[in-house]
Image (cartoon, rainbow, N blue to C red):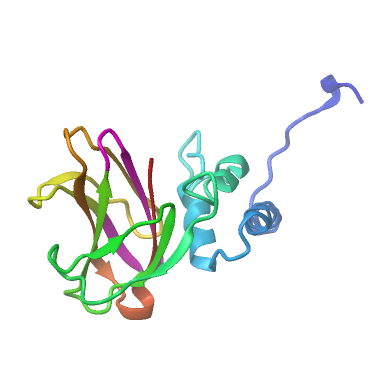
Amino acid sequence: MCSSDLNYGFLQGTSMATPHVAGVAALMLSRHPGLTPDEVETLLKSTARAFPIACSGCGTGIVNAARAVGAVFLGAVQATDVTETEPNHTMLQAQVLSGFPLRVVGRIETAQDIDHFKVNAGVGATITARLIGNPAANLDLALRGPMGTVRVSSARPAGLADVVTFRNANATATDFYLRVTRISGGIGANASYTLEVKVE
């Protein structure tokens, strides 16, 4: 068959979409079998390509296999798992993170809970963090300086990953603070999240 014989056809509905999405999810899981269903869903939605025209009831977008599989790891390799340790409600109580890349598994326990993580960045080092939340809760991510000033933040809707990147332009190594905040939705098991962090 020559390329001039190839045509595109219009199909819609879950019967057509499900095998495509399931295939991409399988590719993601083949790269990292430890991904949770929430992580797979959030990464699929976060890497989807926008519809080229308005589409009522079509969902998040068009699945993008290359971007979804590429997004499985924040860095080049699988991160080390770390469990969130309470209390970490303030910058003074922040959980210290080291040994990057790493993947913090945590959750917002109450409506007032705010989780803080301290990251030391050397001169010229770049901190990249990605928050993958439970779709039942809208969680936001911010990176703050030593005095609490927000340097960069991400406030995407529930079901989409929040990503922040910041380069330490100071003349010395500096402590920065990643902050996970619940905006709305569930708490406890319904506000679980994965926070991936790399410093390079």
Q: Residue furthest front?
A: 172
Residue at screen point 58% across, 42% down: 64
Look at the image and give the residue range highlighted in magenta: 122-141
Residue at screen point 68% across, 45% down: 11
Q: Residue furthest left?
A: 147
The one of 102 and 22 positioned closer to us in this rendering = 102
Q: Say if 94 sits above or below 142 in the image.
A: below
- Residue 50 lies left or right of residue 33; in this view the side is left
- Residue 165 lies left or right of residue 144; in this view the side is right
- Whether residue 8 is in magenta: the answer is no
Residue 93 locus on image (x, y percent): 16, 69
Residue at screen point 46% across, 65% down: 81
Q: Quadrant of residue 158?
A: bottom left
- Whether residue 134 is in magenta: the answer is yes
- Residue 13 lies left or right of residue 192; in this view the side is right
Q: Main secondary structure of the magenta part?
A: strand
Residue 84 locus on image (x, y percent): 33, 71
Residue 129 locus on image (x, y percent): 35, 50
For the N terminus, the image quarter is: top right
The one of 55 and 167 positioned closer to us in this rendering = 167
